[in-house]
Amino acid sequence: MEHARRLVPGAVVVASDHRAYREMSERVFDVLGVFTPTVEPISVDEAFVDIAGLWRHYEHPQAVGAAMRDAIRLATSLPASVGIATSKLLAKMASRDAKPDGLRIVAAGTELAYLHPKPVRSLWGVGEATYARLEELGIATVGDIAAYPRETLVRRLGEAVGRTLWELAHADDQRRVADSAAAARSISVEETYETDLVDLAAMERELLVCADRLAGRLRRGGVVAHTVSLKARYPDFTTVTRSETRRAPMVTSNELFTVACRLLRRTEAQSRGVRLLGIGGEGLVSAAEPRQLDLDGDLWEQIDDAIARIRDRFGADAVGRARLVEPGSQGPDQGSSR
DNA sequence: TCTGGGGTCCTAGGACCC
DNA sequence: TCTGGGGTCCTAGGACCC
């Protein structure tokens, strides 16, 4: 945004509003749920829907897609694009073709004819790096991949990528539509700073902010983390991670903070400075599962819990860490830029 | 062209165990 | 006591996606 503002000094900048996006997203998913229970969210604004069970109610697949688009527009005033096909990959590609506000069908029997002329980059799973490698092999279209010897592709691209791409290029995609989103496997927070952080005290203050945010999200998700990871980006943009796994899972902001500080000392942050810091929780398990708490941990859970309830009721700025108050300021309002 | 934030999965090496 | 094979877990980094 800094760069954009420099280029266009008079630009109107509109802040993002994630609460509104979530609200609209929920309405869209509610609409989809009316059609069928088999709805698998991909992201806040995309989902796979299994419409195989709807053949009784609609004459053509087109009619299902059109009805969904109408219902979404009615409920949210938002345009929606729909791709219909015999597999997830093709439905996804068709929906991309349908954007920004349309409907695209790849009829059964026409899969390969649709797929093979497409550029490799349009396949789900071919990013910048894989694209460059395929280019070196003289592979430009999905059809080229399909014609390439499978074993050679695996040797060049690795087992997982090579095999998957080869199968997808033959329209071999057996993945089913799940009836809900998979449980999160990790939760993380991170922040890029306007100016690089150079001293340890400043870095630790920011880690405390991250630890607080992460603790809140773990708590709301009802999970605890066996592994805590730290992410640091140096001023030259190289990024490193450090992690620590423990038998006893962690949840409290205090635990997350303590581990993150220890991990930070295992990086070169102190000597090089950092542009970004982040903390993540991995190896998530339900907080409802029995686990051993030491007295100290129990106390911090109660503190986090109390803070969460105060924030729910009085707003995010209602309570804060004394440590995060700028020296000389009167309180969190004046002291915090966030 | 200097590049947010939040995720997933894969790979490779090393430790450890049987 | 040594060696080899094979499995799991942990760690770090990279590719990819929205």
Image (cartoon, coloured by chain):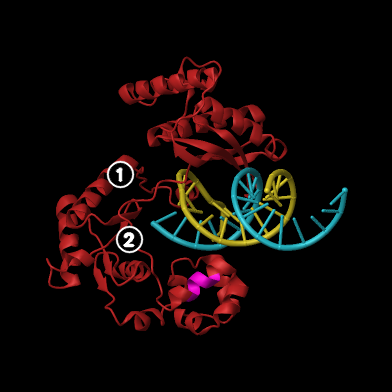
Chain colours: A red, B yellow, C cyan
Say which of marks 1 and 2 sits in front. Answer: 2
| Three-letter code for the amino acid on which mark 1 is drawn | Arg
Mark 2 Cα-neighbour bin, 10 Å: few <14, some 14–19, many ≥20: some
Q: Which residues are magenta?
A: A162-166
Name which residue lies at 62% across and 31% down.
Answer: A261
Q: Earlier in the sequence, mark 1 or mark 2?
A: 1
In terms of secondary structure, what is the magenta stretch mainly? helix
Measured from the top left, where is residue A183 in percent x and y?
A: 40, 46
Q: Disc 2 is attached to a residue of which chain?
A: A
Q: Which residue is mark 2?
A: A177
| Image quadrant assignment for residue A42 | bottom left
Q: Which residue is mark 1?
A: A22
Name which residue lies at 62% across and 74% down.
Answer: A155
On screen, A40 above or below A145?
A: above
Name which residue lies at 32% across and 61% down.
Answer: A177
Name the element at disc 2. loop
Which disc, if any, is residue A263?
Answer: none
Measured from the top left, where is residue A123 in percent x and y?
A: 44, 70
Q: Disc 1 is attached to a residue of which chain?
A: A
On screen, A113 above or below C7?
A: below
| Three-letter code for the amino acid on which mark 2 is drawn | Val
Name which residue lies at 34% across and 67% down.
Answer: A96
- Mark 1 vs mark 2: tell me if same chain: yes
Measured from the top left, where is residue A268 in percent x and y?
A: 71, 40
On screen, A156 above or below A18?
A: below
Name the element at disc 1. helix
Image position of A49 (left or right of A287) = left
In this orientation, does residue A239 appear? no
Mark 1 Cα-neighbour bin, 10 Å: few <14, some 14–19, many ≥20: few
